[in-house]
Image (cartoon, rainbow, N blue to C red):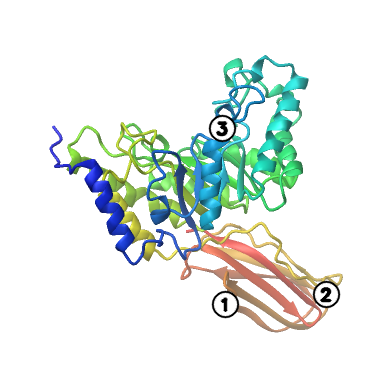
Amino acid sequence: MKNSIRLNPAFFTLFMALSLLLSDDVFSQFAEGKTKWLGNVHSNDQVELFTRYWNQVTPENSGKWGSVEGTRDQMNWGGLDDAYNLAKNNGFPFRFHVLVWGNQQPGWISGLSEEEQIEEIQEWFEAVAERYPDIDYLEVVNEPLHDPPDGEQDGGYMDALGGEGETGWDWIITAFQMARDIFPDSTKLIINDYGIVSNPNEARRYLEIVDLLKDRNLIDGIGVQAHAFNNGSSLSSGTTPQTINTVLNILAESYLPIQVTEMDIDGNPNLDDDGSEAYQLEKYKQIFPVFWEHPAVEGVTLWGWRPGLWRSAQEAYIFDLRPKDAMDWLEDYVDTANVVFAVSNELIDENLTPAGFELSQNYPNPFNPNTQIQYQIAAGSEVQLNVYDITGRKIRELVNRYQAAGTYSISFNAQDLPSGMYLYELVTPDFREIKKMMLLK
């Protein structure tokens, strides 16, 4: 039987609020000043003290089409307005969850003709874009591998978007093309799914969709859910940190930012309070750093942190009248962990490209710890080949001498360097080019 002493909830909540108001770091979120954000979901149960701890916002349920337009042409924006305003009033990134999904969709949409369905989808996209013009990240499609909108109970509008089509995923491409056309250029388009971090084969299937979108310039980031049943913290999950890291490395091959969109880490309800907290704390220590320290991960969003979150029965909350042990550890860890977000799909090359000069992409890439850098020069000249970290600090001079015309291959060993994005630069009197490479240990 659980036997921890609990204070009166109303008194303790008042005590905590007063303590925080009197503290020096009342506006100091866990990830303030870091290269990554650490966010949470917005709902009535999760919003109290939100700005004390978190610096990114995702609506939990209020952004789902079925929540907004449960009755055709009658829009309920209240909860979504609150989430968006919380983010914008505090300068936090806002991720919209979600436009297209096979769950929590309007009950009336599946009964329409395909022509009417596509019109309604267009209206839905346009209504969101008009009301929320400053969305930072937009989840265009959620769970394409595991819950597409293909059945009567799932929205039933996949065929209206093009069905499988020639690519097998035409409906996703159509949805992303519509989003690219309707939303501002400043809004980054994201895909999201579960069952990825626990399964490298699913990650490779997922990457096939990502590549189709990337080839069409329709995607800006990859979302991976990290619920307890996939991340190794639930009593039924056998996922290891090594598997998670393997999956992140696979997805990093896209050179797109990875967002951990829905993380929860369970306690153990079979134990007393102290035992459950100790179990959760150990799981946080094992799991969270794998995501947080990976250089391709842009940020992490917990899917709730207070009682009332969807895995309350599994004791996944980390604040219950007081910060639990896992939350205390999380604050200390994020404060001291030295992490770098080192992925960008923006072009950084500054090229002068006379015929016969070329800097090739290093191979393999990503690499650990050795890679080859090949280049070609058309005429004998002084040659420099340098490696820089992501801040622009030169860390290695590989070549600095006169070389005759020809093709050269230079080995680069990064055994002594941390994981992350690096730049390599070829310079001659007539040519300069910079490329990116990723070290993943």
Residue 1 higher or lower than 222, as above or below: above
Secondary structure category for the residue under label 2? loop
Residue 25 vs residue 232, the one in the foreground: 25
Label 1 to label 2, Cα distance in Å? 29 Å
**SS at badge 3:** loop
- Which mark lies nearer to you, 1 or 3? 3
Secondary structure beneath disc 1? loop
Query: Between 99 and 133, which is closer to the camera in this rendering?
Result: 133
**Mark 3 vs mark 2, CA separation in Å:** 57 Å
Give the farthest residue toward the right. Answer: 355
What is the number of the mark on residue 379?
Answer: none
Q: Say few, some or many: other residues with alpha carbon within 10 Å of mark 2 (under 14 / 14 to 19 / 20 or more).
A: some
Label 1 amino acid? Arg
Upstream in the sequence, badge 1 or badge 2?
2
Pointer 3: what residue? Answer: 64
Mark 3 or mark 2: which is in front?
3
Note whether residue 337 is visible: yes
Question: Disc number at residue 378?
Answer: 2
Residue at label 1? 393
Q: Residue at x 30, y 46 (%)?
A: 319
**What x and y, as percent, mark residue 157?**
68, 22
Residue 429 position in % (x across, y down): 79, 83
